[in-house]
């Protein structure tokens, strides 16, 4: 007889909720394969979800092999560093079941201390602060804004020095056995734990293509998949003691998945707490990234960056790295469009996504999304300066567009503008019947 927890995992309501999250997250994917897979599943989602429910009930559901995707890491100038982030892209059915398991685990009482943590903010939407505080902010402050708000609170409480750090290859250093033991003790449900262990195991379908890079993916006991809905919870579990010990005494440690910042009353205290972090992580088989971690404490008066935000006396603004990345992205969108337009002169195919109207719409979406991500920043002049730079990009783009338009055939003008041409819209025209003489018999009638 199945347990209540496993029944909750496979309930249609839970599977629908999990599918909703996976579908919503997938809309932001840059992978065309992911989008096509989601579209295919969505064509008959109710039937597909019932199929998953049935296979879970019969114990025949299998987590199909995933695809390892090495995403190149970029430096501050947007150039490849030679390093990569090992992303594991599981099939949509696997991602739905992983999310369904997480939905159930989030409600397990013994696991709530790992979820509702006051100093960890990434990946899990835990409830922080009093009910009155959460109602006042309408649950809008979460993730990065919540972490920055916590940093500002500590500065207001007297912190004067900070030290920031990044845990190197964090997810690939989490022990599957260690987190399975903790989750197993909390749920006390053998049937659910069998499914849980299968959900966090990693089997890759493209090992041969990955070659030497395959060893950096979490295919053994050590490491969980970056891209698995369960991984942020597992990160919180493995770092629970780290979070507790790092926040003892007069220092605070605000963590966002693998990034953390120490806030302390003195430089000596900040530096000492950073050494403590190094020691605690070493016991877990983890280490700091030297290139992304402070050497010691620095004064808040000097200003510092955390999670893409620069904080200095009186100002909260996007970091210079984040600002430069935005400008590069916008410039790149314009350059790609102009390159495609120039290709028309040489007979190259031109996709509508490169047209003037589509490019401006895409750039507008980039700017709008970026601005909404940094809604809590208070440095209006920095945003105004960015607008001025982008305005210059737009003027240049429109000027070059006009020059290209003058140099190509008039028949292509409408196409590069992005307005549909009636003659090229696919159709299935009817044939007009041939008119012939009616038979004598019909005429007589």
Image (cartoon, grey):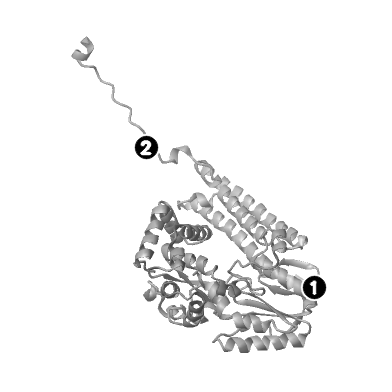
Residue 365: % across, % down: 60, 54
Q: Please report whichever mark, 1 or 2, sits nearer to the chain's N-terminal start.
A: 1
Q: Residue at x 58, y 53 (%)?
A: 362
Label 2 Cα neighbours within 10 Å, binned few <14 / some 14-19 / many ≥20:
few
Counting labels gives: 2
Q: Residue at x 77, y 72 (%)?
A: 312
Nearer the observer, 158 or 101 = 101
Q: Residue at x 61, y 70 (%)?
A: 122
Label 1, secondary structure: give it: helix
* Residue 64, picture quadrant: bottom left
Marks 1 and 2 sit apart, C-alpha to C-alpha, by 69 Å
The residue that label 1 is drawn on is 156
The quarter of the picture where the C terminus appears is: top left
* Residue 426, picture quadrant: top left
- Between disc 1 and disc 2, the foreground one is 1
Nearer the observer, 326 or 130 = 130
In the image, is residue 28 above or below residue 189? above
Q: Residue furthest left?
A: 441
**As drawn, is 43 to the left or to the right of 79?**
left
Residue 61: % across, % down: 36, 66
**As drawn, is 113 to the left or to the right of 148?**
left
The quarter of the picture where the N terminus appears is: bottom left
The residue that label 2 is drawn on is 428
**As drawn, is 293 to the left or to the right of 60?**
right
Label 2, secondary structure: give it: loop
Residue 58: % across, % down: 34, 65
């Amino acid at each position: 007889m199945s347990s209540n927890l496993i029944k909750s995992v496979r309930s249609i309501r839970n599977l629908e909720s999990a599918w909703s999250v996976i579908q919503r997250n997938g809309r932001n994917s840059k992978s065309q394969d992911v989008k096509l897979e989601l579209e295919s599943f969505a064509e008959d989602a109710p039937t597909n979800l019932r199929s998953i429910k049935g296979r879970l009930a019969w114990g025949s559901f299998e987590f199909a092999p995933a695809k390892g995707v090495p995403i190149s890491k970029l430096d501050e100038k947007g150039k490849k560093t030679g390093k990569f982030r090992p992303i594991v892209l599981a099939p949509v059915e696997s991602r739905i079941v992983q999310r369904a398991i997480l939905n159930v685990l989030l409600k397990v009482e013994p696991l709530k201390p790992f979820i509702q943590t006051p100093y960890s903010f990434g990946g899990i939407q835990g409830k922080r602060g009093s009910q009155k505080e959460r109602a006042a902010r309408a649950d809008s402050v979460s993730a990065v804004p919540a972490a920055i708000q916590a940093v500002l609170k500590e500065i207001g409480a007297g912190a004067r020095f900070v030290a920031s750090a990044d845990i190197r290859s964090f997810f690939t250093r989490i022990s599957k056995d260690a987190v399975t033991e903790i989750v197993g003790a909390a749920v006390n449900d053998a049937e659910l734990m069998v499914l849980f262990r299968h959900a966090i195991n990693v089997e890759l379908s493209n090992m041969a293509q990955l070659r030497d890079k395959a060893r950096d993916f979490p295919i053994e006991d050590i490491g969980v998949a970056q891209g698995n809905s369960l991984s942020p919870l597992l990160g919180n579990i493995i770092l629970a003691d780290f979070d507790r010990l790092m926040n003892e005494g007069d220092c605070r440690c605000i963590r966002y998945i693998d990034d953390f910042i120490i806030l302390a009353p003195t430089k000596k205290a900040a530096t000492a707490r950073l050494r403590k972090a190094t020691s605690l992580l070493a016991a877990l088989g983890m280490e700091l990234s030297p290139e992304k971690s402070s050497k010691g404490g620095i004064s808040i008066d000097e200003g510092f960056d955390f999670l893409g935000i620069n904080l200095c006396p009186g100002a909260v603004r996007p970091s210079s790295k984040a600002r430069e990345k935005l400008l590069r992205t916008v410039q790149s969108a314009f350059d790609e469009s102009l390159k495609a337009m120039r290709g028309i002169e040489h007979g190259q195919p031109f996709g509508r996504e490169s047209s003037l109207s589509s490019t401006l719409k895409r750039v507008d979406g980039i700017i709008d999304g970026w601005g909404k991500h940094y809604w809590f920043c208070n440095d209006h002049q920095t945003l105004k300066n960015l607008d001025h730079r982008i305005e210059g990009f737009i003027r240049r783009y429109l000027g070059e567009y006009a020059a290209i338009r003058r140099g190509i055939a008039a028949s292509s003008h409408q196409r590069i503008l992005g307005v549909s041409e009636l003659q090229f819209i696919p159709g299935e025209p009817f044939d007009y019947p041939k008119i012939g003489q009616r038979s004598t018999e019909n005429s007589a009638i």
